[in-house]
Image: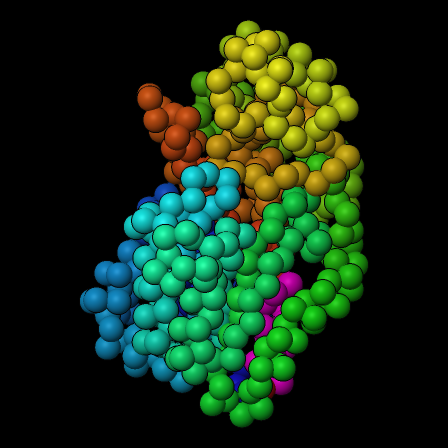
Amino acid sequence: MPTNKKYIDLFAGCGGLSLGLHNAGIQGLFAIEKNSDAFKTLQHNLIEKKKHFDWPAWLPQTNHDINDVLQKYESSLKALRGTISIVAGGPPCQGFSMAGRRNETDLRNDLVNSYIKFVDCVQPDLIFFENVKGFTMEFKKNKEKGIAYSSLVTKRLKDLGYFVKGKLVDFGEFGVPQKRTRFILVGMKNNIVNASQEKIESFFTQLEDNSFSFLKEKGISKTTNLEEALSDLLRAHGTEPSPDTPSFQAGIYGDKESSYQKLMRKNIRRTIPDSHRYAKHFTETSNRFQIILDLSANRRNFDLSQQIKDIYSLKKHTIIPLCSQSKSPTITTLPDDYIHYKEPRILTVREYARIQSFPDWYEFKGKYTTGGKLRVKEVPRYTQVGNAIPPLFAEQAGVILKKILIDA
């Protein structure tokens, strides 16, 4: 099969999956992302810096809603048939997420149908689909009671003529310093020469078998912990006014103390990391964080006990003091959910990005927070990072997808 075909990234967010596929040597055609801030980040890093996408003239180079694209450009999408290697990405997951209230009626769940319609329009050789662990769980009110959405999607893709295989994968097993289990589904069009169910099922076996040598070549370990990921970003290393918001303090780099830090900082010359602005905590808040860190010295990476919450009148649902010697638990889009493993503060956007395996050259655009009453609900840069697919895992997946394409 020709290897010069391109992929399309749906629900692309800030570009974590696209960055991984780029690093795996797979060329992008275009990406669809509704959120303007997330698209600005993708555009800055992968379109302007890396010239990664061969963007078609018929599609404006801006943020788009997938349903608008399907409606306005259906004929152009169908004209792509036979030229697309992969349709990648996964619809927004909030309605399926185990971290919040799982809601079958969440309108975002219907974007799964948009994804399938897009696949039907373009008919790529391969499908790479990602969603939260909750996507595999049953909804009690489902019209087909007792069947998870993952099973329904699998059936519909099979009906479109794809061999498919889905599996839960922990990104922490692939060198990412975070325990983050996601549902991954891959599919291959069954009219391709040498296509078979066995070939597509081998994706997960190859992914696991290749991981050790892949990480060794990168010079990093599968077991990278939080301290190894973040210790060069401590506030104790010193601060300077934040380049993009001078009224805040930003951290400066400390010495590289791990192979993971060396990889993340490759070719970085500046002294202040991008998006490494510290929150302005009240003294009372910092003192409370320090007490929590002290009290939870032997119980890290778990939500605070109700007893401690009651003692300090903490109403917040989730407060997790992090552990330096372990991988991070799955990070959410709310930085107030976590306390830094060593310093009495929340994490910075850059620290979030490190946990998600974004290299330090990757710069994030948009507001840090929205301010006002929505400050704790809408945190654009944190949201972008928290929702992303870790590029380190995406690159490993891309290597295997590329191999399947070449072998077909």
Name the residue nearer the viewer: 101 or 263.
Answer: 101
- Residue 231: tell me if it is visible: no
Residue lying at 59% horizontally and 67% vertically, measured from the top left: 398
Residue lying at 62% horizontally and 23% vertically, measured from the top left: 304
Residue 200 found in image quarter: bottom right
Instruction: Give how far across and how far down residue 352 sits, in percent.
Output: 57, 38
Residue 278 found in image quarter: top right
Instruction: Give how far across and how far down residue 284 sits, in percent.
Output: 55, 7
Residue lying at the far bottom of the rendered structure: 193
**Is 403 inside the magenta-drawn segment?**
yes
- Residue 150: tell me if it is visible: yes
Residue lying at 49% horizontally and 86% vertically, measured from the top left: 190
Residue lying at 55% horizontally and 87% vertically, measured from the top left: 195
Instruction: Give how far across and how far down residue 151 sits, in percent.
Output: 47, 66
Name the residue nearer the viewer: 360 or 35.
Answer: 35
Quadrant of image for the N terminus: bottom right
Q: For the stretch drawn in magenta, what is the main secondary structure? A: helix
Direction from residue 306 to residue 368 in the image, left or right: left
Quadrant of image for the C terminus: bottom right
Instruction: Give how far across and how far down residue 394 sits, in percent.
Output: 58, 59
Name the residue nearer the viewer: 16 or 252.
Answer: 16
What colour scheme governs how the chains and residues are painted in the rendered image of this protein?
Answer: rainbow
Name the residue nearer the viewer: 231 or 375.
Answer: 375
Direction from residue 205 to residue 84 in the image, left or right: left
Direction from residue 142 to residue 133 in the image, left or right: right
State whether residue 405 is above or below residue 398. Answer: below
**Is 384 inside the magenta-drawn segment?**
no
Q: Which residues are magenta?
A: 396-407
